Amino acid sequence: MANNIRHLLDEAVKSSMRERNKERTSTLRMAISEIKKDEIDKQTELSAEDSIKILQRMIKQRKESSSQFSAAGRNELAAKEDAEILILEEFLPEQMSESEIEALVIEAIQTTGAQEPQDIGKVMGSLKSKISVNADMGLVSKIVKNRLQK
């Protein structure tokens, strides 16, 4: 299976190089490097879903770094991280809205028979395949916890 995300990243690098946009080029090359590293580690070409998970991981890391930089008063570094997040998010599929996630969570709670916070794992397990790469799993987890504490 051809990795469409990788192809899109390669094309975006070429375009950003033509535009002489160093920050964008650097961020995109970093993403390609992460994908290549995983391909080498797994000794196989990654699926588009695997590539999306890598981009999501990179975004999560940058969000954490940005909040730490902001807390430390290093706003220029936080802004750089935020800019990288925006670039990487361009290559993610459209994310589910909070109301869509909420509906799936309610359905999963009913399906699994979950009633208390100890059942979070069951609910998250059933949601993982439905939601996959189309939602922030941190948000999903938060919604599940709120639902099960009511």
Image (cartoon, grey):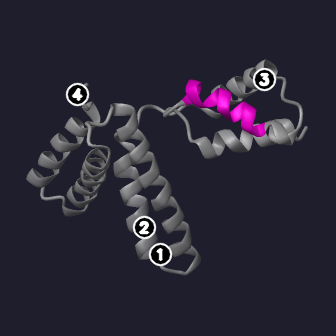
Q: Is residue 123 magenta?
A: yes
Going by the numbered disc 2, the residue's amino acid type is: Ala
| Residue position for label 1 | 75
In the rendered image, the vertical position of residue 1 relative to residue 30, given as above or below: above
Crowding at mark 4 (Cα within 10 Å: few <14, some 14-19, many 20+): few
Determine whether label 2 and label 1 are within 8 Å by CB.
yes
Q: Secondary structure at mark 4?
A: loop
Q: Quadrant of residue 107?
A: top right
Q: Earlier in the sequence, mark 1 or mark 4?
A: 4
Which tag is nearer the camera, tag 1 or tag 4?
4
Q: Earlier in the sequence, mark 4 or mark 2?
A: 4
What range is drawn magenta here? 120-131
Determine whether label 1 and label 4 are within 8 Å by CB.
no
Q: From mark 2 to mark 1, how far is it between C-alphas?
A: 6 Å
- Residue in the image at 25% along x and 36% along y: 45
| Residue position for label 3 | 112
Coordinates of residue 90 in the picture (x, y in percent): 35, 42
